[in-house]
Image (cartoon, rainbow, N blue to C red):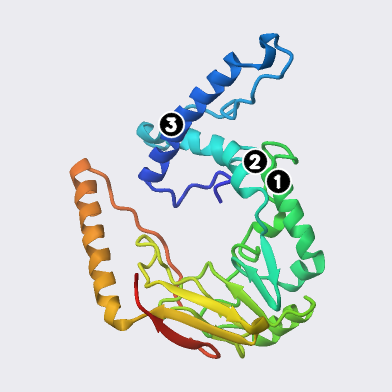
Amino acid sequence: MNVSGDFRFATPQGLREFSAWAGWYRAGLAIKRRCARGGDGSDPPPKNPFLGIPKEFPGVKPEFWDGIRSRLAALRPDGPIARRFLADLPTVLVVGDSVFVHGGLLEANAEYGLERINAEVSEWIRGERGANAVAPEFVRGRDAVVWLRRFSDGVNCDCQRLEGVLGMIPGAKRMIMGHTIQTEGINAVCGAQAVRVDVGLSRGCGNGLPEVLEINGGGTNVRVITTDPADAWQYRKQGAEKAAIATAVKEKKGEVKEGLALLVRESHGLKEVQAKAA
């Protein structure tokens, strides 16, 4: 979303952080221009990621314009943060007999090729398709690999279709997905072929308790490490206190608290163990 310039879930603080980044980055650009090797201009000047980005955004409060502009510069295709931290990350990852994907995979994705998907998304983020190129089709729309909810929406999972998709990926036994918040914690359906791990850990998205999916023994031993109920109350209490302080600060500054739309949705096939909170 951020690489595409979609900041609908970005908070005011998230914009201010990029304004601060932009100040340091501009200072770095100025130093590089002054310290060009040899000083004879033989080296090309460093690229300015802010070029071509508007300074005003109609419909948005002016106080957020700089943050939006800075976030766009950093995260758009070939942006310095996008290229350095995001471009080489896989969109779909197969480890052993587990397929990891943010939203989910359909037959067309498996047929297209997971390596091909990863390569083309990386090319787009690096700006090799042009600074204004749209995202590849398989990461756009409700059936995209980063948006799909067909296998993570409660018990509404087409197990037969999921089994067919996994059958198209050599050695794959399970699909591990995020994106759709699971209020009951990490869970699995379809004989543990669909494993949903988004516990909504962020206070802005569910404020769920920490959980970990552990896969050992070459995939034969899969379990969930969850928060000990004895520690859960204290964890929630600390979270509530932090949220109350943050709300008070926002109210004092006159900021409006933002809400995020959630899709929350049984747990079959996974063993659950408890762990003491740190």
Say which label, 2 or 1, has the lower sequence index: 2
Residue type at mark 1 is Trp
Name the residue beneath numbered marker 3. 66
Residue type at mark 3 is Asp
User: Is 144 above or below relative to 85?
Assistant: below
Q: Secondary structure at mark 2?
A: loop
User: Is 74 above or below relative to 50?
Assistant: below
Residue type at mark 2 is Pro
Name the residue beneath numbered marker 2. 77
Alpha carbon of mark 2 to alpha carbon of mark 1: how far? 6 Å
Q: Are marks 2 and 1 in contact (CB under 8 Å)?
A: yes
Label 1 packing within 10 angstroms: few (<14), some (14-19), many (20+): many
Label 3 packing within 10 angstroms: few (<14), some (14-19), many (20+): many
* Position of residue 233 measured from the top left corner of the image (x, y, whole percent): 25, 76
* Position of residue 115 measured from the top left corner of the image (x, y, whole percent): 78, 61
Give the left or right position of residue 131, taking residue 251 as reference.
Answer: right
* Position of residue 140 measured from the top left corner of the image (x, y, whole percent): 64, 56
Q: Secondary structure at mark 3?
A: helix
Residue 124 numbered tag:
1
* Position of residue 124 measured from the top left corner of the image (x, y, whole percent): 70, 46
Name the image quarter holding residue 201: bottom left
Label 2 packing within 10 angstroms: few (<14), some (14-19), many (20+): many
Alpha carbon of mark 3 to alpha carbon of mark 2: how far? 19 Å
Say which label, 1 or 3, has the lower sequence index: 3
Q: Pick the residue in front: 178 or 271.
A: 271
Alpha carbon of mark 1 to alpha carbon of mark 3: how far? 25 Å
